[in-house]
Image (cartoon, coloured by chain):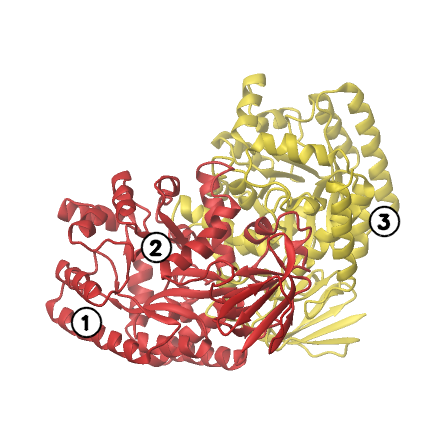
Chain colours: A red, B yellow
Amino acid sequence: MSILIKNVLLGNKRTHIYIEDNIISETGKILEADRIIDGSGKAALPGFINTHTHAAMTLFRGYADDMPLHEWLEKKIWPVEARLNEEFVYWGTKLACLEMIKSGTVAFNDMYHFQEGAVKAVEECGMRAMMGPVFLDLNNPEKREKEIKRQERFFRLLRNLKSERIKPCLNPHSVYAVSKECLEWCVDFSKENDLPVHIHVSETKKENDEFIKKTGKTPVEFLEEIGLLNGKVIAAHCVWLSHQDIEILSRHDVTIAHCPVSNMKLSVGRVMPYHYMQKLGLNITLGTDGCASNNNLDMFETMKFASLLHKHHVSQTSAPANEIFKMATENGAKALGINAGKIEEGKLADIILIDLNRPDLVPNHNLISNIIYSANSSCVDTVIVDGKILMEGRKVPGEEEILENAKRFAEKLFYEK
Amino acid sequence: MSILIKNVLLGNKRTHIYIEDNIISETGKILEADRIIDGSGKAALPGFINTHTHAAMTLFRGYADDMPLHEWLEKKIWPVEARLNEEFVYWGTKLACLEMIKSGTVAFNDMYHFQEGAVKAVEECGMRAMMGPVFLDLNNPEKREKEIKRQERFFRLLRNLKSERIKPCLNPHSVYAVSKECLEWCVDFSKENDLPVHIHVSETKKENDEFIKKTGKTPVEFLEEIGLLNGKVIAAHCVWLSHQDIEILSRHDVTIAHCPVSNMKLSVGRVMPYHYMQKLGLNITLGTDGCASNNNLDMFETMKFASLLHKHHVSQTSAPANEIFKMATENGAKALGINAGKIEEGKLADIILIDLNRPDLVPNHNLISNIIYSANSSCVDTVIVDGKILMEGRKVPGEEEILENAKRFAEKLFYEK
């Protein structure tokens, strides 16, 4: 299967992009193709990569907002999560994938329960993802044994699936919800199986202070000590880091998943030390977090929030548009180990087409500025992942069925006795 | 002309809204109408009211970002503004109105140059606005005389126009760009002609500190002293206020136009003291500011930024969704003296219909939460202002022509020698 995108704006000029199977094989030439897409009035961009989310939590969207953090978790989120099963997670993830495709996201890093359901949803929708079941034992040895078996089972399943688009990833929740024994198991298991690790790090002051009080170490110091840190680790949030923590993360080439919208909404009380991370050359990427704490999966919005949050705290020149765009594309691709994030010959064909004939993209003095600071995600007209067209003219096949079932399963999960 | 919106979600129930001429005359009954709109799958909300903008600055969108404030103003914004004329402002405002209609805004408060062009654009597009030419003399007596004549001419023009949708408003820029003599003229002229006043107040630390140093008074103390403050004043930004300033504004029943996106992007260095304003019962409303400093006119985005900015600085329970929604609707209507902001019998028919069949509005646990925290403005399907349908199925008549001309005039303004 080959696709030619004709007369599309790429950078500063109109050109043509030729896709063979799942690869961008040529730019600039008009070649014969099975499918021709008219790119006039459109710009081509690499699709966005969301490096921290809990996809199936779309079902929780708007269920409980404006509440104190612990009351929110204990009275609203956890009791419902206890009723989840694979089917709920399947439909929640279907809804998440639909939302992400419609907002120009091509790949995501997912941490949640009943991931077998989520894997099925991602396989069907055509996106890329890095996935693994959230791993937490709450210091309970019995739960630990069960969890380890569940993890092993999941990664066996994923190995057997031989998916081109889904990569396995270990997902220990955090240093406060996972015992040292469990984290050490993760270190060994990830080495044996060459698995990346995705973990929440120093999101709130409370969790950070309590951990330091208990162990005498910061979470990052502790993670270094047990040997968990390396270039395949994605650390989400990283708000309450010391300068020394950042130096440790930099030394081990850890990727940061910055979640500005969630951090602001949950009032984590500080801003992630972005400038010092930048200075040390850390790979900073962007995540939306889950819909219980954002409440959407929209990378356009997350990009604007990221830039403006750091401008607000530092200066008008902080976190400029090009830097933010790179975080959401190239840096995200590096984090997930995907040969994408740029539109170049030899890269994977993960491309979005932007409709330029909209008031929020006119005039077009600077497309990247317009994308970061002005447009909303409905400017995405077409989404191509792995050389397949997932959306065209804003239509995703099967959309109505996904919305109907997501509504039905949310009803069942939250309101049926 | 009568319109019946059938089977639409209003609050928690499906009902019907009947519009006669420009008034909501009945809810709940199916009456015969000239036009029937099928509201199934949609929710009706009052349209949004943007209380601080410089509409024609859409032409500056993305022209200069990520620069230090003064370099930005002096090298990028002012030199181009010096080349403006009525025709540029007309097309810039046409683009602004199109963008606002497409994002569910029904009325706005506009301060800019060559407002004769802007008035023409607003008249044509069908929106409501409160308008007046920005008034600044930079302490130059000659400029002052010319400006006063220009102001008088503009308000005469508006009186003769007898528009139902456009209200006149005096727009002295700020205490630092307008002399005391000019502001005193505004006090008199606004009293004689019963005009509201729209003014920038204490946006940046620099302007505030310099004014205090020069006069020994805060801008708010000074404005009270010269008799400018009353219940028809809209004070934009109000970031660097003391508690005493807020008490003064509260005593005079002044409306606040809060511009969180612009404040963050321009790094004004502090957050508007929202909670103390709330405590004193001030009428707080929301503004986008102009596209040089936002870079859009999207009230959905401004609502989310407003809530999250105060959550970020105070707590997860700050600025809850219902409060923010009221700011963008009821409070805005009060500020502009419009009998709207709610969907009730007897109110003006300024209504938007939201398409509920979208991933970012599913599930619908709480519509207002979904509107503030999840949806983007492309969920607006239909916009009715003053009983006229301005957009339906996201189509605004004449859209292509506006986009083409806005592009053409931006090209001319910025790049032609």
Quarter of the figure with residue A389: bottom right
Whole-percent x, y for residue A143 in the image = 15, 70
Q: Vertically, is A359 above or below B147?
A: below
Q: Which chain does the residue under circle 3 lie in?
A: B
The residue wearing badge 1 is: A147
Q: Quadrant of the N terminus of chain B?
A: bottom right
Visible in this render: residue A339? yes
Q: Position of residue B85 (x, y in %)?
A: 81, 39
Residue at x-position 28% and y-position 50%: A202
Pointer 3 residue: B162
Labels 2 and 1 share a subunit = yes
Measured in 3D between alpha carbons, the distance from the residue under mark 1 to the one under mark 3, in whole angstroms, is 73 Å
Q: Is residue A54 left or right of A366 when viewed as pictured?
A: left
| The disc label shown at residue B357, or none | none
Which of the 4 image quadrants contains residue A162?
bottom left
Q: Nearer the viewer, residue B392 or A277?
A: A277
Q: Nearer the viewer, mark 2 or mark 1?
A: 1
Q: Secondary structure at mark 1?
A: helix
On the rendered structure, is A127 left or right of A240?
right
Type of the residue with mark 3? Lys
Q: Which residue is disc 2 drawn over?
A: A68
Q: Nearer the viewer, residue B147 or A402?
A: A402
Is A79 rendered above or below residue A308? below
Q: Nearer the viewer, mark 1 or mark 3?
A: 1
Residue at 26 percent across and 61 percent down: it is: A173
Q: Position of residue B314 (x, y in %)?
A: 39, 45
Element under label 2?
loop
Residues flagged by tags 1 and 3 on a common chain: no
Q: Is residue B47 visible?
A: no
